Image (tube, grey):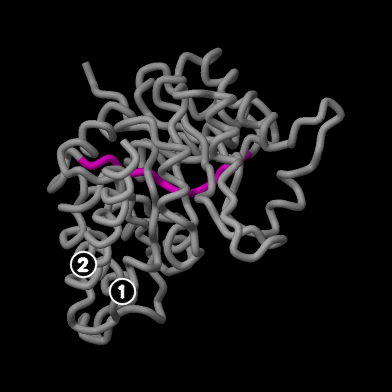
Amino acid sequence: MEKGFRQKLAERQVEVNSLVCVGLDPLPEKIPECIFPSWRTSNRILAQMCGIVDATAPYTSMFKPQRAHYEAIPDGSRVLQRIVYHIHSNYPGIPVFLDCKRGDIARTQQRYRIAHFEIDGVDGMNFSPYMGKDCMEQLVDKDHLGRAIVGLCYTSNSSARKTQDVKLSDGRFYWEFMAEITLRWAEELGIAENAGLVMAAAYESPKDSGNIFSKHLSRCREIIGDKLWFLIPGIGIQGGFIAETIKVSYLGPGTIAINSSSAITFASLGEDFAEAAGGAAKKLRDQINEVKASTM
């Protein structure tokens, strides 16, 4: 029987003792000059990302390419698919999660399901639940229930507070309602075992400088317990705080994955770009493990 995403993630986290998710988000202006300047941009990005994959693989439990970064370059879809193939072929124990945040009517979501799971070949993807249950339901393939389908819930961009923190008539925040309903949909669709939520890392409160805000993470655990895993953005360049994030969200292997993209991918733009990325991934893994050791 094929392993589900969450089991695969948990096993990988135990194997390499890491909660790190490496984001693979290329930018044409940040391709190291040492990578064959005469090549097409798409081939240079392919070389850069595969080099980073190879260097960070010992320290990561998951890879997360952001599809917009590939859609914005000519021949980018081919590059993305080659990277996914490279990971699956060389590191079969590491799941690949596509950051694409799709959310549309039923027939369009069906096309996204085919595009990303069957053509791109990824193991999981996220979606926007705003248009309703169809957004999740049409990503489900009954022959592949082990895929990860993860709903946006509490995101790391600061302007999200203007919408996700709206109070409903019953006193709940809108994001709390979305956590509850995403779990309900996942249970009704029979995919709760591998479904998850995007939940931002702990961050400094914009209203109270020096105060670290992590209540959204602890509150979400109160709502859904261990039934859904968290994909956690906001660490690194966005300034998320590791210790506070781990303390209130981590419940064991397979319960969270902490993403870092730019801080790893662009750790160096020199000839040591891959080595520097590996070093940054290792540093983040070790920082996380120090917190785990002190709190467990």
Label 2 sits on a secondary structure element that is helix
Q: Pick the residue in front: 153 or 91.
A: 153
Q: Is residue 33 left or right of residue 217?
A: left
Label 1 sits on a secondary structure element that is loop
Q: What residue is disc 2 on?
A: 279
* Nearer-N-terminus badge (2/1): 1
How busy is the neighbourhood of tag 1: few (under 14 within 10 Å), some, or many (20 plus)? some
Question: Splitting the image into 4 quarters, where does residue 188 fall?
Answer: top right
Question: Splitting the image into 4 quarters, where does residue 223 fall?
Answer: top right
3D distance between C-alphas at marks 2 and 1: 9 Å
Q: Which residues are magenta?
A: 94-103
From this view, report whether residue 218 is shown above or below residue 283.
above
Kindly indicate whether the residue at mark 1 contacts the one at mark 2 (C-beta within 8 angstroms): yes
Task: Residue 43 in the image: state x and y as whole percent.
Answer: 27, 71
* Amino acid type, callout 2: Gly
Residue 267, numbered circle: 1
Q: Is residue 219 left or right of residue 193?
A: right
Question: Splitting the image into 4 quarters, where does residue 56 fall?
Answer: bottom left
- The residue located at (59%, 37%) in the rendering is 108
Task: Residue 139 in the image: state x and y as whole percent.
Answer: 50, 29
- The residue located at (55%, 35%) in the rendering is 218
Q: Is residue 150 left or right of residue 295?
A: right
How busy is the neighbourhood of tag 2: few (under 14 within 10 Å), some, or many (20 plus)? some
- The residue located at (40%, 67%) in the rendering is 262
Task: Residue 244 in the image: state x and y as whole percent.
Answer: 47, 48
- The residue located at (56%, 22%) in the rendering is 183
* Amino acid type, callout 1: Ala
From this view, report whether residue 283 is shown above or below residue 194.
below
Task: Residue 34 in the image: state x and y as whole percent.
Answer: 21, 85
Check the picture and name the quadrant holding the C terminus.
top left
From this view, report whether residue 217 is shown above or below residue 221.
below
Q: Main secondary structure of the magenta part?
A: strand
